[in-house]
Image (cartoon, rainbow, N blue to C red):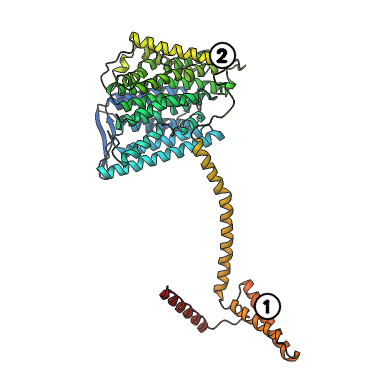
Amino acid sequence: MINTVPPAAIFIIGALFIPLFKGKLKSVYLLLLPIVGFINLINIPEGSHWAIGFLDYQLVFGQVDRLSLFFGYIYHLISFIAILYSIHVKDDFHHMASIFYAGAAIGVVFAGDLISLFIFWEIMALAATYLVWARKTKESSGAGMRYLLVHLFGGLCLLAGIVIHVLGTGSVEFGYLGLNGLGTLLIFIGFGINCAWPGLHGWLTDAYPQTTATGAVFMWTFTTKTAVYVLARAYPGTEILIWIGAIMTVFPIFFAVVENDLRRVLSYSLINQLGYMVCGIGIGTHLSLNGTVSHVFCHILYKALLVMSMGAVLHRTGKIKCTELGGLYKSMPLTTIFCIVGAASISAFPLFSGFISKSMVVEASATGGMVVIWLMLLFASVGVLEHAGIKVPFHAFFSHDSGIRTKEAPLHMLIAMGITAFLCIFVGVLPGPLYSLLPYPVNFEPYTASHVVTTLQLLSFGALAYIFLLLSGIFPAEMRATNLDVDWFYRKPVAAFLWFCNVPLTVFRNGIQTFSSRAIKAISKFATDPLIVPETIFKGIQLGVLKALRGTPDETTPKIAALEFEINRLIKMKETGRYYGTETPRRPVGLAVLVSFALIFLYLIVYMIV
């Protein structure tokens, strides 16, 4: 471990110096960060490193084993590809947020304690939010705010769980936790929000399509895969994850086939693929965990390839909806080829990366006797072909001719997509190097006759079903519409609550404030001379009696006039509030003291009676 530093340090510290570089030198500097980070990583031996005392606990920034190293390798690799893809971006803050995001994800992967894990977890949320806001549209502004609020809530669940767990066990070590109390349950939920579990997934399909064309590569990689990592570390073999994962593989299919926005289609596809990983963690065998980890590697590559191809389309055309695209294979032939490679990989065609990883989780469910789960995973395999394997490349590059004629993607984008496409094919043809990096020994051979034939049969059935449904008019037509998801059930009530706060509640508040101000003003005037009101009333009664019993004019008229003058003077003083001006004699102090004692005495009597 000579001359090495914590893996996250190179990214997080390096991001601070990005504004100091300009032009091509900045591009070189950005590309060197993941290269230097990878060199640093491969020189770190397994074990615990960089432990720092904090209060009564030990913070460990380098918990290195085969699982964390595997995630570290793919994170450095995809960071280099994503930086190369986004090298044309002029916004320094965009680059800084991207590098911070990658560095924080790496920090979580190598965190050996819950405190440092939480710190890196929150940095991820903040950096990712900027990548949504950086698109600078009304939609991205709202989506970014919702993304931030959801992840702050998830962070609070995580923090509360950590506090309860640490108080109960006295340890901040991050390892296997299991569901054994309120603390670990809250941690479980905090991880699950980032993993986009069913019902908690609305933030993903809301925010990811609103990111910048280049920031999307980072977004589709780190948050959810880091959640998969912490679940694999802390909750392997937790049975509820089997069903959560299986449901995740199925329900996004129905949303994706009717979605018009192609990046939103890929968001649902992301949830579908996460389901295989979560299910593998829940099964908890060596085969399923190897399948989960290898699928993370393959998924990051082919999903990045699909996202980059759609990002190139958005970059060149400014459009990303099925109803607005089509015929782009004429203008962007290389991007079309790369997109098809990504589609074949995510569909698990033989000789492509998805085939050698997804099948491990499916096989683990079959060997474990989980027939229902196995059938759900097979159905999901056919479904992903429908939306990500066929729909995305077909509507973007073929389908009807939209008449759009544009340039091919920039060279650096093509190189980034070319590297990723090569890796998708290389891993699919030669899975041995990938299998050698997995946490457990691999006793799985993907290229058996039965496995290849079964896969081809499923894919053929899926393709024929798509063609039949499309030609018969049964398949949902692409429409310019917004599809509702489960987030509607909390976004609409929240909007209604905000309206209630801004309109009826504001009117009520203003009314209370006006009434209170007037009451306080009246009380203040009364407190200045509490006898003025009863004195006015008494003189008014006296005046009325004199008028009723009016005698000779000479006797009563002067008295009535004097009383009327005195009453008018008292009313005027009450309205102006100037009760003790120079023209008005002050009340005797003794009278005020007498009234005070009388009130206190009355209060004591009432108090004793009650």
Whether residue 410 appears in this view of the structure is: no
- Residue drawn at x 29%, y 15% as measured from the top left: 444
Task: Name the quadrant containing residue 510.
Answer: bottom right
Question: Position of 482 compared to 458: left or right?
Answer: right
- Residue drawn at x 58%, y 28% as measured from the top left: 481
Crowding at mark 2 (Cα within 10 Å: few <14, some 14-19, many 20+): few
Numbered mark located on residue 471 in the image? 2
- Residue drawn at x 47%, y 27% as measured from the top left: 216
Numbered mark located on residue 568 in the image? 1
> What number of labels is visible?
2
- Residue drawn at x 31%, y 22% as measured from the top left: 288
The correct choice, above or below, for 342 with respect to 111 in the image is: above
Rendering coords of residue 393 (x, y %): 51, 17
Question: Position of 256 compared to 539: left or right?
Answer: left
Task: Name the quadrant containing residue 65.
Answer: top left
Which one is in front, 54 or 168?
A: 168
Rendering coords of residue 459 (x, y %): 44, 13
Quadrant of the rendering where the C terminus is positioned = bottom left
Q: Secondary structure at mark 1?
A: helix
Q: Label 1, label 2: how many angstroms apart (C-alpha)?
A: 94 Å
The correct choice, above or below, for 365 with respect to 607 in the image is: above
The correct choice, above or below, for 381 with respect to 51 in the image is: above
Residue type, label 1: Asn
Question: Position of 451 compared to 333: left or right?
Answer: left
Name, please, the residue furthest toward the top: 449
Q: Secondary structure at mark 2?
A: helix
Which one is in front, 135 or 186?
A: 186
Quadrant of the rendering where the N terminus is positioned = top left
Whether residue 209 appears in this view of the structure is: yes
Rendering coords of residue 522 (x, y %): 58, 69
